[in-house]
């Protein structure tokens, strides 16, 4: 475990050192950004819509019973932008994009394509890891912004059309606007950026250390997804604790 953590730190450090070369890889970054963002958009929309709806459905009736219907918008708004939006999108991207990164790079390792790149004096980190890390670091915060807006819409629709709640759109969004500030949104975006770096680093590392043919590729994909999700949930606690100070 400690060896893997050390290797991932070294991989991240070396990749960050190549950021000045990112302009040369702009086409690959654009391709990866389109693939990550566009292909994940529909799933992000569906997931966020129902998460926001479930939040309102679970909390709304109990709050209405206690005369606190005016805080439903605040609960849905804060939960989506500070916690559920970043975490759920990170888990979604880890399962969909992280696995694809590990499989693609792992296949190149198994079939000696990475060795061929090195033979041609092409740095695999600059050619393979850097564009993916930049693309996922840009795509995940954008997806989180989109998911937060969709989640708020889902919570508003449930609050308005559920007969046990019966809140108006104006009442929902007035509560949301009064309790959710720019700092809360930035809180979630900072988390999503950290999660994106974790997913990209873990997935690329697992791909680069793949051994053993097709079975090894499968193991690398599984490890990439599981390790990413575990690290996301662990870091979520520490990031939340850290951001509570500000």
Image: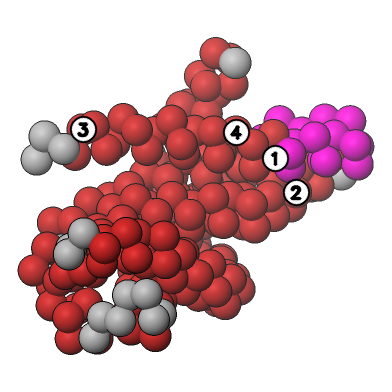
| Vertical arrangement, residue 228 with respect to residue 61, above or below | above
Among numbered discs 4 and 1, the one appearing first in the sequence:
1
Residue 66 magenta: no
Name the side, left or right, on which 125 lies relative to 139.
right
* Residue designated by label 1: 207
**Marks 2 and 4: CB-CB under 8 Å?**
no
* Residue designated by label 3: 242
Among numbered discs 3 and 2, the one appearing first in the sequence:
2
Q: Residue at x 64, y 42 (%)?
A: 225
Q: How packed is label 4: few (under 14 Cα within 10 Å), some, or many (20 or more)? A: some
Name the side, left or right, on which 181 lies relative to 122.
left
| Vertical arrangement, residue 102 with respect to residue 215, above or below | below
Among numbered discs 2 and 4, the one appearing first in the sequence:
2
Does the magenta stretch mainly form a helix, a strand or a loop? helix
* Residue designated by label 4: 227
Q: Nearer the viewer, mark 3 or mark 2?
A: 3
Q: Give the spatial CA distance, label 3 vs label 2.
A: 34 Å
**Marks 3 and 4: CB-CB under 8 Å?**
no
Q: Residue at x 37, y 38 (%)?
A: 236
Q: Give the spatial CA distance, label 2 vs label 1.
A: 6 Å
* Residue designated by label 2: 103
Depth check: give the residue in front, 102 or 189. 189
Provide the secondary structure element on which disc 3 rests.
helix
Q: Give the spatial CA distance, label 3 vs label 4.
A: 22 Å
Provide the secondary structure element on which disc 4 rests.
helix
Among numbered discs 3 and 4, the one appearing first in the sequence:
4
Quadrant where the N terminus lies?
top right
Quadrant where the C terminus lies?
top left
């Amino acid at each position: 475990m400690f060896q893997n953590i050390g290797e991932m730190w070294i991989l991240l450090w070396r990749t960050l050192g190549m950021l000045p070369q990112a302009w040369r890889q702009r086409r690959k970054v654009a391709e990866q950004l389109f693939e990550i963002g566009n292909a994940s958009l529909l799933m992000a929309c569906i997931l966020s819509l129902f998460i926001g709806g479930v939040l309102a459905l679970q909390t709304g009736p109990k709050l209405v019973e206690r005369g606190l219907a005016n805080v439903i918008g605040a609960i849905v708004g804060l939960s989506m932008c500070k916690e559920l939006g970043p975490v759920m999108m990170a888990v979604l991207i880890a399962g969909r994009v992280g696995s694809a990164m590990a499989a693609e790079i792992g296949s190149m390792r198994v079939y000696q394509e990475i060795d061929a790149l090195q033979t041609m004096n092409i740095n695999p980190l600059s050619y393979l890891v850097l564009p993916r890390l930049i693309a996922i670091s840009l795509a995940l915060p954008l997806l989180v912004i989109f998911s937060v807006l969709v989640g708020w819409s889902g919570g508003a629709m449930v609050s308005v059309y559920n007969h046990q709640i019966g809140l108006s759109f104006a009442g929902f969004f007035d509560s949301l606007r009064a309790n959710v500030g720019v700092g809360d949104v930035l809180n979630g975006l900072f988390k999503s950026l950290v999660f994106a770096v974790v997913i990209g680093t873990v997935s690329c590392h697992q791909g680069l250390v793949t051994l053993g043919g097709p079975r090894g590729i499968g193991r690398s994909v599984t490890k990439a997804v599981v390790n990413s999700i575990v690290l996301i949930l662990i870091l979520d606690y520490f990031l939340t604790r850290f951001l509570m100070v500000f």
